[in-house]
Amino acid sequence: MSPMPTRISSDEVAHVARLARLSLTQEELDRFTAQLGAVLEHARDVEALDTAGVPPTAHPLPLENVFREDEAGPCLDRAEVLAQAPAVEDERFRVPRILGVTP
Amino acid sequence: MSLASAVEVAAGVKDGTVSARAVLEEHLGRIERHEGQVHAFNTVTADRARAAADAVDAAVTSGRDPGPLAGVPVALKDNLCTRGVPTTCSSRILEGWIPPYDATVVSRLQAAGAVIVGKTNLDEFAMGSSTENSAFGPTRNPHDLDRVPGGSSGGSAAAVAAGFAALGLGSDTGGSIRQPAALCGVVGAKPTYGLVSRYGLVAFASSLDQIGPFARSVADAALLLDVIAGPDPADSTSFREPPPRASERLGAGVEGLRVGIVTELTDAEGISADVVERTREAADALSAAGAKVDEVSVPAAVYGLSAYYLIAPAEASSNLARYDGVRYGLRASGSKDITDMYLRTRSAGFGAEVKRRIMLGTYALSAGYYDAYYGKAQQVRTLIIRDFETAYRDFDVLLGPTAPGTAFPLGAKTQDPLTMYLNDVCTIPSNLAGHPAISVPFGTGADGLPAGVQILAPALGEVVMFQVAAVLEAAAPDLPVPQLIRSEVAR
C-alpha cells in the first residue's frame, strides 16, 4: 500500500480541475487548494489503520448480474426527451465542433 | 385543530369522513401562510395536487379502494424525478429541466393514493448538511427561522415539521434524512440499502444513496416505507425478495430486546453533552420498558467520516460527469468547441460544494493516489461492516445520537467545509455498511431545540428497528409545536 502523499498543491488542484472539466478562477484555485488540503489531512487518520489483507468493499450488497429476457418494452418518448435538449437538429442532439478538438 | 397524522388521514379519506381535497386545501393554506418564511419548496404543485386529490375522492365515491396513502399530502425531495414537473437538485445545471419519467417511488406513491404537494429544497445534489448549499437559497428551520433545518433533505424535513405535508421523502447518502429529521424534530429513516428502488433518484454516490421517509410519527414513517419498499426491475441493486414490513411489530414493545449504546457515537468528534444526555435518557427509557441495555464498541466507526469523504466524492465525481450540456439542463452559450462547452457549462452550473467534491473524488481516484485514498477507504468500509457484525452478535439494535448537536444558526458552518462534514459523523457508518437507521425526536437540547436519537439495525432489520422506535417515541418528552404554526395548531 502506497503511503498518502504530502499536502495537495495548487498545481495538482488545477490538474484535477482540468480532468473534471472545471475551469477555476485564481481565487477559487487558492480557496479550494486550502479546503481540499484540510479534508485530505483529516482523512490521514485512516493511514494509521492496519488494513493488510483486508478486502475492499465497493458495495454493501453481494451483487450479481441481473438477467431478463430481451423483450421490447415501453421506452422514453422521443419528442419529450428532445424537448429538454439545449439544441436539436434532425431529431438529434446538436453539439459544438468535436473534430480537431484537443480532448 | 391539530396536525393530522398520515394514518388518520388515510383512514378518514378511505371511510369518507373527510375528503382528500379538504385535507389538501388545509395543507396548501399552511404553505400559503408560511412558505415565504421557511422556503421548504423549490416547486409547489398545487394544481396537480388538486387533480390528484379529486381523483382519490372520486375513487372513494365510486366504491374503489383509494390505496394505503389515500389523500395523504406528501413532499418530495427535488432530486426525485417527476414526469412533467421540474426536478432541479437545487442546482443551476438542472434549472428548468423537466424529467420525461417518474422515479419508481413517485409511481408507487401515486398508485397508493398519495397527493404530491411539491418538490423540496436540498443542498445542491444532496451535498451538504444544512440546505444552505442550494442554488435557490437556504431553507429555514420551522422551530427557529434563524437556524438551519439540517440537510441535505432540509426542505422535506421542514415541510413535514411545519405541517406543509403529512409525509416527506428524502435521500440519505451520509445522513441526509436522519440529521435534518433530528434538527427539525421529526422522524426520519434510512432503509437498508436496496430496500427502496433508486430508479429516478438523481445519483450522488450510488453505493450509499437510499431513499427514505420523513414523518411526524413512527407509525406514519413505517406506513410510507411499506408503500415504497420492494423489488424493482428498473433498479438492478434493489432486493429481489419481498421486503420486511416496517409496520409489522409497532406495538410489540421491547421486552427482552438487547440494545447497545455505541460508544464511538457518544464519544465522537464534536458531540455536545446535551445530545449525549438525551441518548442516555432514551436508553434508560428502553431499559424501563424491558430492554437489556449495555454499551458496545464498534471500533472502526471512528474512521467512517474519513472513509466516507473519500468514497462519496469518488462516486460523485463519476456520477456527475453526465452533466455536460449535451442532452438536458444548462448549456453555456458561445462555446468554440465541445471541450470549451463542457468547461464553461460545468463551471457555471455547479456550486462551490459540488465542485469541491467532484475535485476531491477525481483526486482520490487519480493515477498514483487510488490505492492510498480510495482503496484504503474501501478497506475501512469492510472493517466497519465486520465490527457491526460483531456487535449484532450480542445486540438486536444499536443506539446513538443522530447529530452532534441541535439546529445551528444559518452561516455558522459555511466557511469551513470540514466543520460542516462533521455533522454526519454519527450517521455515516450505517451508509457505509448499507444498514438501516432511524432518527426519533427525543427531547430538546439546552437551547430548547429538538434533539434526535438514532436506532441502528442490521441489514433488513427494519421490523425490530421500527419496533424499538415506537417505544422510544412513546417515552419521549412532548416536543414544542414549531413557533411558526403554534398559534394555529394545538397538539
Image (cartoon, coloured by chain):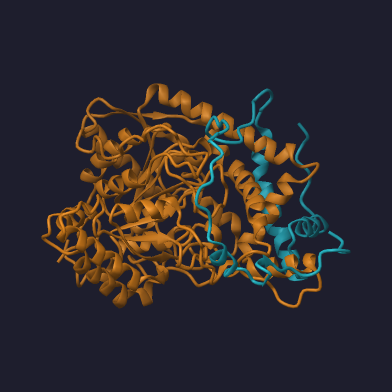
Chain colours: A cyan, B orange
A67 w.r.t. B425: above or below:
above
Foreground residue among B114 and A6: B114
A21 with respect to B357 (left or right):
right
Q: Residue at 35%, 36% (x, y): give it.
A: B462
Residue B196 place in picture, x, y as percent: 42, 43
B53 with respect to B351 (left or right):
left
Q: Residue at 37%, 54% (x, y): give it.
A: B181
B222 w.r.t. B287: above or below:
below
Q: In which quarter of the image is the C terminus of chain A?
A: bottom right
Foreground residue among B176 and B442: B176
Residue B458 place in picture, x, y as percent: 42, 31
Total numbered labels placed on residues in the image: 0
Q: Which residue lies furthest to the front in this view?
A: A72
Q: Residue at 49%, 65% (x, y): give it.
A: B87
Decide if residue B3 is in sight here.
no
Foreground residue among A22 and A100: A100
Q: Quadrant of the N terminus of chain A?
A: top right
Decide if residue B194 is in sight here.
yes
Q: Residue at 34%, 34% (x, y): give it.
A: B244
Residue A77 place in picture, x, y as percent: 53, 61
- Residue B74, by quadrant, is bottom left
Residue B437 place in picture, x, y as percent: 40, 41
B312 with respect to B130 (left or right):
right
